[in-house]
Amino acid sequence: MTTGEPLLTVDAATVLLGGREVLRDASLTLHGGELVGLIGPNGAGKTTLLRAVLGLVPLAGGEVRIAGLPVGRARHLIGYVPQRHEFAWDFPIDIAGAVLAARTRSAGWLRPARAADRAAAEQAIERVGLTDLRGRPVGELSGGQRQRVLVARALATGPRLLLLDEPFTGVDTPTQETLGELLAELRDAGTGLLMATHDLPTAAKTCDRVALVDGTVVAEGGPELLTETGSLLRAFGLTATGTAS
């Protein structure tokens, strides 16, 4: 259930990368207790939009506010689950260490782990179902296990807003089910979730709302929007015959 003011407000966000406009006048809102899916083709700007919310790319126009705060003052409220290739899986660390590192890094590299950090990391590992494997090196994990490590790293920081970039891509069915159940639990507990995904059936099943992205937010609405052929084809740059326009 969503209440009160939006947790996330993106207002006419424009991003230039290498002098090229990759996102223009994109706007959306998200409340706590809501899961919103970003749907669109490769290169549509979904990941750029997530990075703009994180403050990792500068805005050429517009603004992003989290709980009423500018991004620079609200990073402690955000958790981020990147695509798996963005993590150094060859680094000599086990699951417990990888999750704990996310917790201590958010508080400053030089501060040693405290009991509260270790407890939060262990709770996050348990929530993604990896307690029995907590001592296993991350380089020995399957794709689904690696995805759960990334989710645990984000959860360990206790975010109010969780951003996920293609969390269901290339993972096995048990991991899909585990992640789907966990996202539902987080949403029901009041966390706001913004998820970029190519998995249309999963988005239709799990999202409260979807935003169709193609350089900007071209349409926004309930998951039934994914079954409205015209809106979906326009977002994916396709014609009615299924070929690129």
Image (cartoon, rainbow, N blue to C red):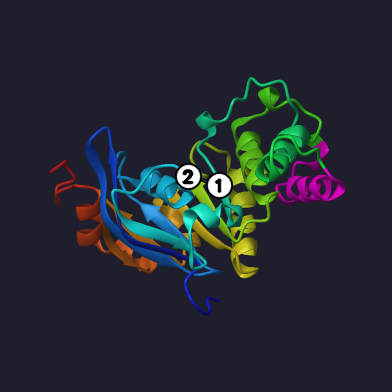
Give the dominant element type of the magenta stretch: helix, strand or loop: helix
Q: Residue at x 61, y 50 (%)?
A: 179
- Check the image and name the residue furthest to the right: 115
Amino acid type, mark 1:
Tyr
The answer to the question of whether label 2 and label 1 lie on touching residues, with beta carbons closer than 8 A, is yes
Residue to which mark 2 is pinned = 165
Query: First in sequence: mark 2 or mark 1?
Result: 1
Q: Residue at x 23, y 35 (%)?
A: 19
Image coordinates of residue 96 in percent, x first then y, are: 78, 36
Query: Element type at marker 2?
Result: strand
Circle on res. 80: 1
Left or right of 136? Residue 147 is: left
Query: Element type at marker 1?
Result: strand
Span highlighted in magenta in the image: 114-132
Q: Quadrant of the N terminus?
A: bottom right
Can residue 216 be seen at all in this image of the molecule? Answer: no
Q: Residue at x 49, y 70 (%)?
A: 31
